Each structure stands twice: as structure tokens, then as C-alpha cells.
Image (cartoon, rainbow, N blue to C red):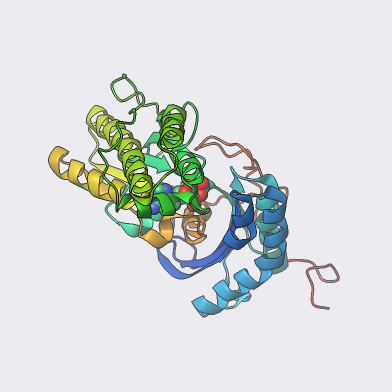
Amino acid sequence: MSTAPTWVLGIESSCDEMAAAVVHRGARIASSCIHSQTEVHAPYGGVVPELASRDHIQAVHDVAQRALADAGIEAGDLDGIAVTAGPGLVGSLLVGLSFGKALAYRLGIPVVGVHHLSGHLASAELADESLRPPYIGLVVSGGHTALYRIEADGPPDCLGETRDDAVGEAFDKVAAVLGLPYPGGPAVAKLAEQGDDTAFAFPRPLLDRPGFDFSYSGLKTAVALAVERSEPLDDATRADLAASFEAAAIDVLVARTRRAVADSGLSHVAVVGGVAANRRLREVLAEAGERDGFTAVFPPMSLCTDNAAMIAAAGARLLARGEHHGFALNSFSRVPLGGAPWRTDVAPPAASPPGTIGSDG
Ligand code: KG4
Ligand code: ZN
């Protein structure tokens, strides 16, 4: 097994966070900086892609500088750069990608494109050294809800995924109908703590069906109808609606995951993506693991939502295998986990020649 490069800078800009981080030997997070755009998008109740790209352009240089300074290194110490290449908002991705490529060119070091979900899975592997493939990966974010069998060699096997909305999207939409501020997931979870999770009997879509697919649009609609019927909403009813929704959403995730573990005979589940920050999911799945005999690995809260440490760690692994993606590296809005349309396997770049934009002279 080849050794991980000493210092890798990771850059993540697939949505509304500009993040940069430095990871040492693929395993230790030396710095992790995030510039959030919550205030930019809050008035619109969701991410406005053009505003996201514009904010990224302003932030990228400072965030990267801060990541290097916090790690106590200089750009010249870097051995490689890892950048999220997809899936995500193309305009947002291009900002991080172009910056990463320019810096790699200037420094004469390799640049690799990283799949955003490989990054999320790497966040669990960073958190727990005992988590090594093969294992079950539950990816739960604003854009994805899927179960994978992650293999040591070869592409991940998608066991099932959402047929409509992602679970994080359902949290965000329920937040909107309950009049909660953006971003919705954490707000719904907080309100749910004060509610009765049995007050409303919401559907658990596909719970008893075979297979591993998910569906969240019916649950979202059921909550919206219950809100309409309960209007005008008092505080206690809002909390009950939030708690009953959260219970239904999490029940389905846990039931499908238990089935995937039982079916595969594997001993570890990595739960990653923004919704992995949900306390109820963490508690209920940990209890299920104790009963069924599997270990549920959750990244620390700071690594659940989008960050660049996970991208640097996943990138370090690609670089250790000798992958270099070259300066034609592009961004992609939709890419299945395991896919890497940006992969060109070109030779490592030469240091920037004198007299070009890369030189000081
Ligand atoms: O992974 P992430 O930061 O971005 C994507 O790649 O989508 O995930 C963001 C999603 C949002 O839908 C957000 O509402 C949800 O994760 N989220 C939560 C919690 N924290 C974030 N959902 C439920 N409970 C939480 N505590
Ligand atoms: Zn994400």
C-alpha cells in the first residue's frame, strides 16, 4: 500500500459553503475552515445558485490562506490539492475547482477531483480507524438518501436510494411549512425536542416493502396537510408536528439500514451527510446496532455537514494511488458515487515554466 502524501489541501464548494482544509498523511486534520453563506440565502429560504457562486469567488482565497495558516504551513509545503468536482451546483463547483487547479499549476503539484459523497464517507473513516471497507454506507444529505455497500476494491454497490425527495430536503421543506428559518434541518430537530412524537401518525413510506429504496415526498405532503388542518398553529402543535415528522423520517432510515446490514452480513455502518448530525438518528441507530450486533459510525458533528477536511482525506487516498486528474479537470452536477467522469489519469504536471503566469519573474 502506497503512503499518503504529507500535506494535502482540500477545497469544497459544491453548494453554499466555501471550505478549505489541510490534512496530514491522509489521516490527521491539521486545519478546517468554513465560510458559510447562510446569511446570503436566508431571505430566499433556500440556496440561490448565482449568489452562491459570487460569494464563493470573494471567499475562496481568504479561506484557503486561513487553512494553510491554521495548519502552520505554507503553500510551498503542499504535496497535492484535492477539489470537489461533483455532484453539486456547477457554478459553485467551478470556483473551488479553478482556484485549486491554478494553485496546483503555480506550485507544480498534482490536483485530483473528488466525488462529494466519497468525501462524506471519508469523514466517517477519519472519525473511526476501525471503519474500513467493506461496510454499509448510509448517505443522508440535502441532495441524497441512499444505502451503499462500500467495497475495498471496485465501485460501491448502490443498494437503494430515494425515489423522490432526499431526507434532508424533506426536513428543509417541513421547516418551511412550520415557518422555521433556513437552514431547516437543525431548526426542525431543535423544535422536535419539545414535542410529542406520537401526536400525529405520519406515514412511514416503503417501510414494509422489500428492497432498500426510500421515498420522502408522501411524508412531506402529509405534514403539509396536517399543518393546514391545524392552523392557526400554536407553539405546542408546531413542536408536535416537528417531533412526529422527525420520528417518521428517522424510523424509515433506521429500518432500511438494519435490513441492509442483516442482508449483507457486514458489521459496520457509516452514516454520513448533513442529516447524520441529527441527534435522534444517532441515538436510535446506535441502539439498533447494540441490539443487532453492528457498529454505527458517525463523524463528529463538525464533519457531518459540508467541509473540506473530508475532501482532503479522500483526495489523499487518490493521490497515494498515483491518480492525477490534470488541468482539464471539470465540474459535474450529477455523478453517481463511484463515477469519476473527470478522471483522465494524466502524468503529474511539471512546475510552472518561467515567464508564464505561474512564475514570480
Ligand atoms: O451534507 P450537507 O451539508 O449538504 C448536502 O450535500 O446536501 O447536508 C445538508 C442537509 C440539509 O438538508 C439540512 O437541513 C440537513 O442536512 N441537516 C439536518 C440536521 N443538520 C443538517 N437534518 C436533520 N437534523 C439535523 N440536525
Ligand atoms: Zn454534502
Q: Residue at x 35, y 48 (%)?
A: 239
Find the residue positioned furthest to the front: 232
Q: Is residue 97 above or below residue 135?
A: below
Q: Nearer the viewer, residue 301 or 324?
A: 301
Q: Is residue 75 above or below residue 189?
A: below
Q: Nearer the viewer, residue 5 or 96?
A: 96
Q: Is residue 193 left or right of residue 345?
A: left
Whether residue 116 appears in this view of the structure is: yes
Q: Is residue 81 above or below residue 78?
A: above
Task: Provide residue 296's location: percent of width, then percent of height.
Answer: 26, 47
Task: Provide residue 110's location: percent of width, then percent of height.
Answer: 62, 58
Q: Is residue 149 left or right of residue 107?
A: left
Task: Provide residue 280's location: percent of width, then percent of height.
Answer: 29, 48
Task: Provide residue 193's location: percent of width, then percent of height.
Answer: 30, 53
User: On the image, which quarter does residue 17 sit in?
Assistant: bottom right
Find the residue positioned furthest to the right: 355
Q: Residue at x 31, y 35 (%)?
A: 200
